[in-house]
Amino acid sequence: MSVASPTSRRAPGPCEPLPLAVNNATLSVLQTLAGEYGDVVRIPQANERVAYFINDADAVREILVRQHQRYRKGRGFERVKMLLGNGLIVSDGEVWRRSRTMVQPAFKPRKLHRLTDHMVACARSLQRQWRTACDVGESLNITRQTSDFALELILISIFGEDLKDVAALADDERFQFLAPEAGRDLEMVKRVRDLRRWIQSVIDMRRTSNRDDDDFLALYLAATDRTGQPFTDKQLLDEMITLIVAGFETSANTLNWFWYLISAAPEIESALLEEIKAALALAGGLNADTATNMPLAQAVLEETLRLYPPVWLFSRQALEPIEVAGYDIEQGADLYLSPYLLHRHADHWRDPEAFSPDRFLDRDAPPKAFFPFSLGPRRCIGEYFSFLEMKLHMAVLLPEFQLARIEPAPPACEFAINLRARDDIRLMPTRRGRAA
């Protein structure tokens, strides 16, 4: 065992190398190390490399916000880059800054509000399916249901009327690499290539058409950098794939866990129903104003993201020697930051394992140990879009349906690139009455 003395600037940690990856075993390793050494742990790696686990809230903010320019994306992103190309999630430096600046206007609230009709329509599609399930007494595979909802919505939001058969999207093989059971193998690579070819055909058509589209692809095609240059086709392909994956994963996973959590929280569910009723009356129906007037729903979703952040492990690599939380960090060292573990840190959260949305209702004091969408300049650009679609999803479905748990045991988690339920969650729906 290696433990720092009071005057040492070397972080404590084990002497022997411990492999780190994006999997359940790594979560167990990090939990053990945090319990033994504290919130900053030095972890030797193979080939004389070194990694650090940073579970200190102030240090995490320093790394992601104030000192972000002294780091680049860390280990583990190579695998993501194979899937996404050099899009916004994985790019660094000037490539990232240029892309972020170009796409930022597409994510302004007034632009996203134009997509609310699509959000409501996708939720209405689920509503019809859930009514049928209630009529015949069938349970819902809520994992698949929320996945289909999020996939349909992000694809319509990107490609608009170029999607000829919306009803077949969930079964389209081009998009099956997004499914939880999809293997990261040659078949997946083939599907991504097929999807890229289809997107390229849409791009080619759009460049020669005179249509006045108002979807994400149209906005990305019109975007230019400060020299007036647009995206190349290769850059556009990378950004479209990135937008599909990022726009799908976060909302699908969060809604999956939301329905599971709310199914055993009747008091919170009752309060949500009252809020939705008031918001619908105030906004005059289902629209962006409805979502704006749902602070409890916002808190419920944030609490869901606290317990089950879609990205459970971030990594950064130090570009130069740097100090973190009073310890010296070597140039080239890999830093691992875990929203999942920091979100359950007893120093920052009262009763951290409990589902308690009240902790997010004090908007004047947002919790500092909370970063499901990352922090700083690289905070997820689609955060507002995700909350907007999830709250409208709730506003359509929650007033009509109550979902009950079938299995008494909590679902096991799979800690891969994204945090997912290891097995699909099934819930039993019943009708409350007439829909809102």
Image (cartoon, rainbow, N blue to C red):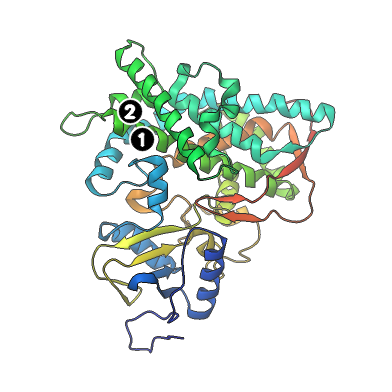
Residue at x 48%, y 79% (from the top left corner): 37
Quadrant position of the C terminus in the picture: top right
Residue at x 50%, y 44% (from the top left corner): 185
Q: Residue 340 or 348: which is nearer the viewer?
A: 340
Is 419 positioned to the left or the right of 111 in the image? right
Q: Residue 195 or 266: which is nearer the viewer?
A: 195
Label number found at residue 123: none
Q: Residues within 10 Å of mark 2 (few under 14, many from 20)?
A: many
- Percent position (x, y) of residue 369? 47, 62
The residue that mark 1 highlights is: 239
- Percent position (x, y) of residue 301? 57, 46
The answer to which of marks 2 and 1 sits earlier in the sequence is 2
Residue at x 28%, y 38% (from the top left corner): 99
Q: Residue 393 or 285: which is nearer the viewer?
A: 393
Residue at x 71%, y 24% (from the top left corner): 128
Q: Secondary structure at mark 2?
A: helix
Instruction: Evaluate whether residue 348 shows in this view.
Output: yes
Instruction: Evaluate whether residue 289 shows in this view.
Output: no
Outermost residue to the top: 210
- Percent position (x, y) of residue 82? 39, 44
Of the two numbered discs 2 and 1 in the rendering, the one whose residue sits closer to the viewer: 1
Callout 2–callout 1 Cβ contact below 8 Å: yes
Outermost residue to the left: 227
- Percent position (x, y) of residue 381? 39, 41
Is 420 positioned to the left or the right of 399 in the image? left
Q: Residues within 10 Å of mark 1 (few under 14, many from 20)?
A: many
CA distance for labels 2 and 1: 9 Å
Q: Secondary structure at mark 1?
A: helix
The residue that mark 2 highlights is: 220
The type of residue carrying mark 2 is Tyr
